[in-house]
Image (cartoon, rainbow, N blue to C red):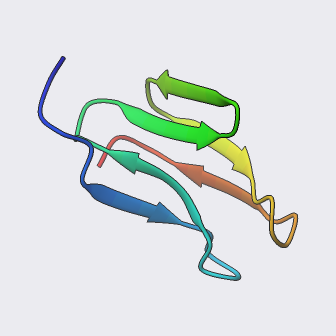
Amino acid sequence: MDAEFTREWRCRDCGRLLGKTNGSQMQIRRKPLDYVVGFPVLATCPGCGSLNVTNKP
């Protein structure tokens, strides 16, 4: 795997942590699951329900 997942991806509306990236992949943890996905990433915030999208940083 590449470098550690250190850069945070947060919800654009409420600021809740959605995932962490290492620059080439995104890690998303939602107990009991742990996903590592490629870009672009689309996620619904579990806190406020806002739809968030990010492209490769």
Classify residue 30 by image quadrant.
top right
Left or right: 38, with 23 as reference point: right
Furthest toward the bottom, the residue is 14
Q: Residue at x 26, y 31 (%)?
A: 24
Q: Nearer the viewer, residue 32 or 10?
A: 32
**Residue at 61% over, 51% down:** 53
Q: Residue at x 59, y 80 (%)?
A: 15
Q: Please, is residue 50 above or below residue 20 in the view?
A: below
Q: Is residue 33 left or right of residue 6?
A: right
* 41 in relation to 8, above or below: above
53 to 42, vertically: above or below: below
> Does residue 18 appear left or right of residue 31 in this picture?
left
Q: Position of residue 9 (x, y in %)?
A: 45, 60
Side of 13 where 21 appears, left or right:
left
Q: Residue furthest left?
A: 3
Residue 41, image x, y percentages: 56, 38
Q: Residue at x 70, y 81 (%)?
A: 13
The N terminus - image quarter: top left
